[in-house]
Image (cartoon, rainbow, N blue to C red):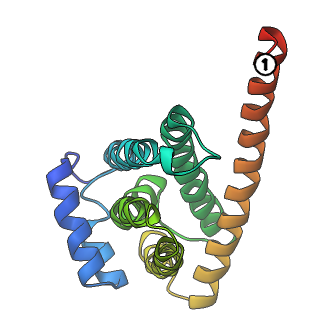
Amino acid sequence: MTSGPESNVQDMFAQSVAVLSRPGPATFERFERRGGLTGALIYVMIAAVVSGVIAALFSFLHSDVTFFGQLFGRLITIPLGFLAFTGGVYLIGRTLFRGTGNYPEVAYSFALFYVPLSIVSTLIGIIPILGWLAMFVIGLAMIYFGFLAVQSSMNLRDQTQAIVTLVLAWIAQMVVAGVIGTVIAGIFLAGRAVTGN
């Protein structure tokens, strides 16, 4: 489902720079077929590892989190959240609006902006007060780039369709995150009950 070999991480970084510095559906169109699902997942796992390590190293600044909780939490939630969201974009765009893109194009397009912005968000997020404001701004940037990526990867040029696709995919991601969170919490509670801690 890709038009050539998977891009390597260096190529993906250069493509991310292009997407972030020249935002628009046409920029995404240039790169959406240069990689596929494997490349997107490798790139997202890099973001998960970097974010997990950074969050874990600074966990001592927060009394409500632990080193391993931050590390493993991000290693699990970042890729699963990405898959749930991009899967939602693909299924909703295709089902409701007859979008013509394929899932590897969606995943790859989203990875190009999601990975660098999520790493920057983690770096800035460790700064008290300023971190929240910066994370809010980065969140808005993610919405904007997501809007452009939907238009390109699913070939949905109608702005309303692109917005509805994003909103419904976000809701789907929240539902999946809630289910996963409940399962993980249940596992931890069961572990505590068994060990007596």
At x 20%, y 49%, the residue is 9
Q: Is residue 1 visible?
A: no
Residue pushed farthest top?
A: 195
At x 21%, y 60%, the residue is 13
At x 25%, y 54%, the residue is 3
Quadrant assignment, res 126: bottom left
User: Left of 163 or right of it: where is 135?
Assistant: left
Quadrant assignment, res 14: bottom left
Query: Which image quadrant: the C terminus?
Result: top right
At x 21%, y 66%, the residue is 15
Q: Position of residue 112 (x, y in %)?
A: 33, 63
Q: Is residue 187 visible?
A: yes
User: Left of 141 or right of it: where is 65?
Assistant: right
Q: Considering depth in this image, is 78 or 73 the residue closer to the camera?
A: 73
User: Left of 22 or right of it: where is 47?
Assistant: right
Three-letter amino acid code at the position of disc 1:
Arg
Q: Position of residue 17 (x, y in %)?
A: 22, 71
The crowd level at tag 1 (other Cα within 10 Å; few <14, some 14-19, many 20+) is few
Q: Position of residue 184 (x, y in %)?
A: 72, 32
Check disc 1 and report the residue beneath it. 192
Q: Considering depth in this image, is 34 or 187 the residue closer to the camera?
A: 187
Above-or-below relation of 84 to 184: below
Q: Considering depth in this image, is 112 or 69 the residue closer to the camera?
A: 69
